[in-house]
Structure formats: structure tokens, C-alpha cells
Image: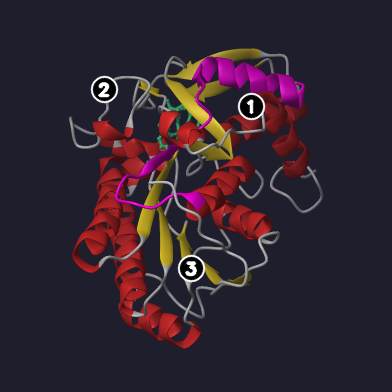
């Protein structure tokens, strides 16, 4: 449903403002004329209900964005199922329930494209939710995110709360995690190409076959889409947030090598999982709400590499 909701003058809480998405949201919200409020983990541990209640009752935000989550790449998801399921369930349940209790006017919850069935028809429409089995490497995270969507729908249905959800695709950008064990593919490839270049290596190794296809969106585009959705969308229907284009992982690796300036061969660690064969979301619902991405992947990769190699950053000399 299309609406007009003005953020100007509103007290807006970005829960998880230190993360890659949360910090992009704070940058984007700076031009909306709203008051941004944030809480550090010392102020409020989002997995503790009493702390979330005390903080929200004391701070009374009118608007809440929920990018706060325990996130990681395919290996981290597969290795820490309890942490991904438990922490994400607690964070979202605490924030969404308390938002209703303290009378938050509008809330936007962030899900993930991994909520959809492993073999969903491509491009994946929002209607594919719960139509088939999930990808096993990230089903724990996916189940938590599906619960978050359902919480928003349930509080709307039972209490009339204006809580909406967005499903971002694989995101990348400044502030990403470059740790090879826990990161997503794009920062991992950037670190590998960077280190291979510095070492004068003949090759760099990627996980799996390189054939899985993924859709990538720059986090600044994502933040722009989320603010747009907050202003124009209401209703139980959640909305995919993606670029509408996907790329094979091996081709992504070559794009990254190009940006980094490493010219070696690609080798494969076939002991590592491929995960979902393809994850391209339909962008129709978001396009119908008049939003388009503006940062092409090759340009975004170059920009993030420049960011990551600046002094004090993850790939600095
Ligand atoms: O980004 P990624 O870890 O997550 O991996 P998913 C995407 C693809 O890149 C997989 C391959 O096929 C990986 O095997 N890949 C190749 C690599 N080399 C590497 C590497 O060095 N590091 C990593 N990490 N991958 C996650 C989910 O799935 O995506 C989360 O586990 C979440 O729940 C997130 O949804 C957005 O796209 O497979």
C-alpha cells in the first residue's frame, strides 16, 4: 500500500547503528530533518528484554529501523546455528514487542533474501516465502528472519501497529566485515585479491565451484531504499530490496581482481559449500514504489576497495 509518512521532526532510532547497514542508514537519515537516536551495547543489550524495555521507555522513539542482527557469511552461518537463531530471535522479539508497547508510530524490520526456499523460482517474488525447504547452510538465520517478518505482520493484525519489513539482497559496502572466516563473499574476495597482489602470488582461491549466482547491492543504495520504504510503504506485504541483477561468484571474483589490480588465476576450495545455486530477487514490488538503485556493481567494488585500503581500515598497509 502506498502512503506518505514524513520523517521530518521525528525521533528515529536506528537499532544496530554501528553495523554496516545501521551506519549507512544514519548517513542517509542525516538529510531527512529527523532526530537520530542510537544506543551502544553498553547502553542497551538488544538480546536482553529488560534492557530494551528500559531504554525504549526512557528514549521513546517514534520511528524504529531494525538492521540490528547477528550476520555473517555462509561458513559462519553453518558453524554457529545456535548463535544465529537465538540472537536474532531475541533481538527482533525484544524490539518489535517493546515498540508496540511504547507506541512506536512506524517500524521497519530487515529480513534477508535467504528467507526464500533454496530452489525458489527466479527472480524470487515475495510470494515464494514458505513454499519450499530452505538452504541448509543458513536455515537457522532464515528461520529467525522469517519470525521477524511474521512478528511485524502479527502486531499489525492483532494491534494495528504500522510495522513493515524489507528483504535486502546480499549487501556490501564501507564498514563491511573483512575477516575471512566470518565475512560474506565480496569482502573476502577483496582481501584475498589484495593479499595475493601484495605477495606477488600466481593465484587466489575461492570457496566452492564459483558457479552460484548472487545479487549484490551497495549498502548506501540499500539505506536509500529503506528510508524510501519507511516514507511510502505500509501494509503486511514485505518488499524485496535488490539491484535486480545477479552475477556468478567466479565472475564476481574477476571483477574484484580487476578493481584490486591482481592478474592471477582462480583456484577452488571444493571443501567449502556453494550454498543456494541462485538468489536473484524480483525487484517489481520496489520498482512499483518508484525506487531504483544508483551504484553499479563495478563502481561500488572500486569505491569499497578505496575505502578498505585507507589508513586505519581493514586492508590498509
Ligand atoms: O556471501 P556468502 O558467504 O553467503 O557466499 P551466501 C556466497 C557464495 O560465495 C557462496 C562463495 O557460494 C560461497 O561459497 N564464496 C567463494 C565465498 N569464495 C568465498 C569466500 O572466500 N568467502 C565467502 N564467504 N564466500 C549468506 C547467508 O549466504 O548470505 C546469510 O549465509 C545471509 O544467511 C547472507 O543471507 C546475505 O549468499 O551463500
Label 3 vs label 2: CA separation? 36 Å
Residue under the image location 56 percent in, 43 percent down: 222
Element carrying mark 1: helix
State the extent of the magenta-drawn residues as a range.
232-261
Query: Mark 3 or 1 closer to N-term?
Result: 3
Query: Relative to the observer, which residue lies in front, 230 or 306?
Result: 230
Residue 294, image x and y in percent?
66, 33
| Residue at the spot of label 2 | 119
Quadrant of the image where one finds ligand 1: top left
Task: Name the residue tied to disc 1.
Answer: 297
In the image shown, does 12 or 93 lie closer to the viewer?
12
Position of residue 58 relative to residue 44, above or below, is: below
**Count of marks, rendered view:** 3
Q: Is residue 188 magenta?
A: no
Circle 3 residue: 63
Q: How far apart are marks 1 and 2 (CA)?
A: 25 Å
154 or 94: nearer the viewer: 154
Residue 147, placed above or below residue 131: below
Amino acid at each position: 500500500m502506498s502512503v506518505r509518512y514524513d520523517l521530518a521532526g521525528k525521533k528515529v532510532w536506528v537499532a544496530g547503528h554501528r553495523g554496516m547497514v545501521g551506519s549507512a542508514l544514519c548517513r542517509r537519515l542525516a538529510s531527512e530533518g529527523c532526530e537520530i537516536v542510537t544506543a551502544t551495547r553498553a547502553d542497551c543489550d538488544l538480546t536482553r528484554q529488560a534492557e530494551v524495555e528500559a531504554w525504549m521507555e526512557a528514549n521513546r522513539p517514534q520511528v524504529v529501523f531494525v538492521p540490528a542482527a547477528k550476520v555473517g557469511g555462509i561458513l559462519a552461518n553453518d558453524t554457529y546455528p545456535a548463535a544465529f537463531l537465538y540472537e536474532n530471535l531475541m533481538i527482533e522479539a525484544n524490539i518489535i514487542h517493546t515498540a508496540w508497547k511504547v507506541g512506536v508510530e512506524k517500524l521497519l524490520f530487515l529480513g534477508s533474501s535467504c528467507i526464500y526456499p533454496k530452489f525458489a523460482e527466479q527472480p524470487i517474488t515475495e510470494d515464494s516465502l514458505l513454499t519450499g525447504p530452505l538452504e541448509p547452510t543458513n536455515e537457522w538465520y532464515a528461520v529467525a528472519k522469517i519470525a521477524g517478518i511474521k512478528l511485524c505482520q502479527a502486531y499489525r493484525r492483532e494491534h494495528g501497529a504500522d510495522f513493515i519489513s524489507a528483504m535486502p539482497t546480499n549487501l556490501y559496502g564501507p564498514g563491511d566485515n573483512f575477516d575471512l572466516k566470518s565475512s560474506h563473499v565480496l569482502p573476502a574476495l577483496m582481501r584475498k585479491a589484495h593479499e595475493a597482489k601484495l605477495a606477488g602470488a600466481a593465484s587466489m582461491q575461492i570457496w566452492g565451484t564459483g558457479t552460484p549466482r548472487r545479487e549484490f547491492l551497495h549498502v548506501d543504495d540499500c539505506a536509500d531504499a529503506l528510508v524510501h520504504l519507511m516514507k511510502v510503504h505500509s501494509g503486511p506485504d514485505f518488499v524485496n530490496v535488490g539491484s535486480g541483477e545477479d552475477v556468478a561468484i567466479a565472475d564476481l571474483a574477476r571483477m574484484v581482481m580487476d578493481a584490486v589490480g591482481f592478474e592471477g588465476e582462480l583456484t577452488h576450495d571444493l571443501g567449502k559449500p556453494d550454498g543456494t545455486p541462485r538468489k536473484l530477487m524480483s525487484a517489481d514490488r520496489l520498482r512499483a514504489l518508484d525506487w531504483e538503485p544508483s551504484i553499479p556493481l563495478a563502481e561500488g567494488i572500486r569505491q569499497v576497495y578505496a575505502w578498505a585500503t585507507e589508513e586505519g581500515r581493514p586492508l590498509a598497509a
